[in-house]
Image (cartoon, grey):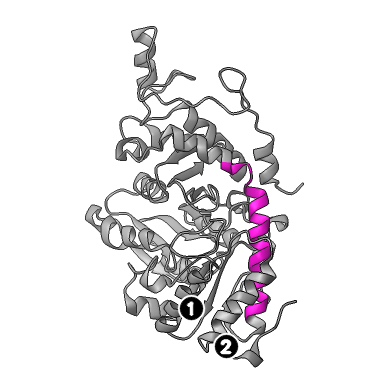
Amino acid sequence: MSFKPANNIQDLQYFGEFGGVNPSISDASTYTFLSAKTMFDTFEGNADGCYLYSRHTSPSNLYLGEALAAMEGTETANVSASGMGAITAVLMQLCNSGDHVVSSRTIYGGTYAFLKNFAPKFNIETSFIDITKPKVVEASITKNTKVIFCECVSNPLLEIADLKGLSEIAKKHNVKLVVDNTFSPLSISPIKLGADVVIHSLTKFINGASDTVGGVICGTQEFIDDLRNVNDGASMLLGSTMDSLRAASVLKNLRTLHIRMQQHSKNALYLAEKFEKDGLKTVYPGLKSHPAHELFKSQMNTEYGFGGMLTIDVGSLDKANDLMEMMQENNLGYLAVSLGFYKTLFSAPGTSTSSEIPEDEQKEMGLTDGLIRFSIGLDAEIDRTYNMMRDCMVALKILTQDSVSVSV
């Protein structure tokens, strides 16, 4: 049977303290014990079902972690106060001074900045490579390499990682494959393709409301226990703890993720096909023109589509800015970073979410000034959205009236 992540979420059933259909929220920062011995055992990690201190964990955070582990098919999960809180904890837990990371060169700007500028303070070095070329990945591994890091669908160029191939390389060299699945929840299940650890920024599609920041680390019980260890656990000691009220909020929104991802994907595919037909340089994994279209198909859970992210290139930063401002003025979405909102969000990644990457490296990887990254919303009439976007492009002479594919 194929993996059914949405069913795994649906099958979880929690009861609140007073029989509520939502689990009760624990807003305590610390927890009491009936005996000093139990407190000692809890510090040592030997008291199941007991809570110590909310920086360690809380009932609300554990509920959310269980649901996300079920979604990804891992033994357990640990939530954090942000996506970067998850990413940095994993890398600091897996790497010591003198170790080495092999990372995709097209990743979220914050991840890039951490590996490029911050990790070297701890004598952790990173090789940024083209993750789509297996020979390059393998050639970059040294005796000190501990981690291969990539995104399932890369930010912002929408390159697709061959997770099965990368897993084979990782296992061959006894390194961990750590995968950021923020762009493709439900659509891709990295653990089933051989990943060791899966990370999400919960801020994006999973929460879906642009009203909170959060992250999660999905992995084995042993690894999550290591992260929570009071003596040397990165999640415990670095302090990126999710608030219980926020955890409860994300858990409620998670329940509609499967419906939202289907609509995000449906709308994104519609727009991508229209934009490409209009002659715009369009990148979307669901297009046959995408170089990794077949790879994505081979890895995907088909009912959730190819995701809600697409890019177009309008030729220059000035044109990109003019178009985004006009689309915002016409209520087509927001000129904003992030993704997964019910409204479409658009930004020029070279000057926003990927601005941490030096300009020469942006050019080398193909990140152009005129690139616009879209997180497509849940629009009920996507043909109406397309027609309005097309009108903006015609008004700015990005398209001519004759070149457009009119939707009726």
Q: Which residue is mark 1?
A: 323
Q: Secondary structure at mark 1?
A: helix
Separation of residues labelled 2 and 1 (CA atoms): 11 Å
In the displayed structure, 20 sits above or below 402; it is: above
User: Could you tell whether 102 is left or right of 66 in the image?
Assistant: left
Q: Which mark is residue 399?
A: 2
What residue do we see at 39% from left, 42% from top? 81
Residue 264 covered by magenta stretch: yes
User: Could you tell whether 235 is left or right of 151 in the image?
Assistant: left
What residue do we see at 69% from left, 84% from top? 405
In the displayed structure, 194 sits above or below 125; it is: above
What residue do we see at 56% from left, 67% from top? 160
Residue 203 % position (x, y)? 47, 50
Q: Which mark is residue 357?
A: none
In the displayed structure, 26 sits above or below 380; it is: above
**Main SS, magenta residues:** helix
The foreground one among 124 and 318 is 318
Residue 207 % position (x, y)? 53, 47
- Residue type of the residue flagged with mark 2: Leu
Q: Secondary structure at mark 2?
A: loop
**Crowd class of label 1 (few under 14; some 14 to 19; many from 20; radius 10 Å):** many
Residue 149 covered by magenta stretch: no
**Magenta-drawn segment:** 253-275
